[in-house]
Image (spheres, coloured by chain):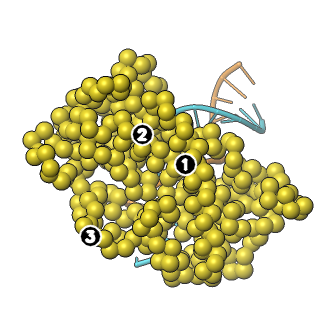
Chain colours: A yellow, B cyan, C orange
Amino acid sequence: MPELPEVEVVRRGLASWVAGRTVEDAQVLDPRSVRRHALGPEDFRGQLEGATVLDAVRRGKYLWLPLAGPADPPDAAPHTALLAHLGMSGQLLVEDPGQPLEKHLKVRLSLSEAPGMPGELRFVDQRIFGGLAVVPLVPTHDGGAGGRSESPRPLIPAEAAHIGRDPLDPLFDPAAFHASLRSRRTGIKRALLDQRLVSGIGNIYADEALWGARLHYARPTDTLRRSETARLVEAVRAVMERALAAGGTSFDSLYVNVNGASGYFSRSLDAYGRSGRPCRRCAAEGDVGVVVREPFMGRSSYRCTRCQPVPRNARW
DNA sequence: CGCTACTCCTGCGCGC
DNA sequence: TGCGCGCAGGAGTAGC
């Protein structure tokens, strides 16, 4: 389940292995994986062939590769990009073309030769919530609670224009985040999952950060004190940085792999998936707190009954 | 305009 | 043993 750290690991991999190379051929094995490319698989292929990848950029969980067309002048600003969202199960793999085809292989891009680098970028996606598209890059007003006005305005896909800054982004603004939490009338976990407000957080890291900050997921955002928001932001950063450190190492293997970061999940989660087990923090303090699983937003939430008690005026 | 419910998918694990 | 169902969830969108 890729959240920000996993997507960032993939971005770094793409920047190392794919930037500077030209797409020589594109093959769509399952049109559902390019359904967000409005003009269809054939156009997708046509727009990629001959395009050179300039960079790998991320905003929240959206990832894109700015492209230079074959006729573009060398210094021209890119006006299109290959946009990727990994959804629930997407992977971007850099592999030798001779490697066995993955069961859920959806798209193959052959890349121009580069010394010591595999020749193919593959998109593999079991559940097909993710996908690829070639899209225009447009100047953004950089909306979103974490942003500030910048010059020059960054070029980003319209699809990602509404996504806020993530907590690790230097331009993330904790004071603005606190203000937007206070101005809303919702629960804190809903706010954490709203990618416009703060990006990169999914169900797992939301639960981990709330556990770290000792906050219940239904805590009304308009009652949050500045110190509590600060604690929460720190908890989000801590869990993301740990995951990033864990995932960053698995990527030495010529392999841009979302699952590379998954070792983190089984090892060091404190709340998510631990229902019925003692709360580690409570146990360390000699108390008896138990992690419970509760239905929330059609999903599950995990919390400690003792150190994350139900707040007054809870907003579910 | 803001929130909720639904939808897109596949694989796995459980109960009968 | 096999089948069917519930669950997992990011995010866009329809609808109230």
C-alpha span from label 3 to label 1: 29 Å
Look at mark 1 in the image and give the residue it sits on.
A244
Residue at the image position 46 percent from the left and 48 percent from the top:
A8
- In this picture, is A187 found above or below A158? below
- Per the image, label 2 sits on a secondary structure element best described as helix
First in residue order: circle 3 vs circle 2: 2
Q: Chain of mark 3?
A: A
C-alpha span from label 3 to label 2: 28 Å
Q: Chain of mark 2?
A: A
Horizontal side of residue A274 vs A104, given as left or right: right
Near mark 2 (Cα within 10 A), the count class, few <14, some 14-19 or many ≥20, is: many
Q: Nearer the viewer, residue A274 or A126?
A: A274
**Amino acid type, mark 2:** Gly
Whether labels 2 and 1 share one chain: yes
Q: Position of residue A132 (x, y in %)?
A: 34, 43
Is residue A135 at all visible to an observer of this figure? Answer: yes
Whether labels 3 and 1 share one chain: yes
Q: Quarter of the image holding residue A223?
A: bottom right
Q: Nearer the viewer, residue A82 or A5?
A: A5
First in residue order: circle 3 vs circle 1: 3
Look at mark 2 in the image and give the residue it sits on.
A13
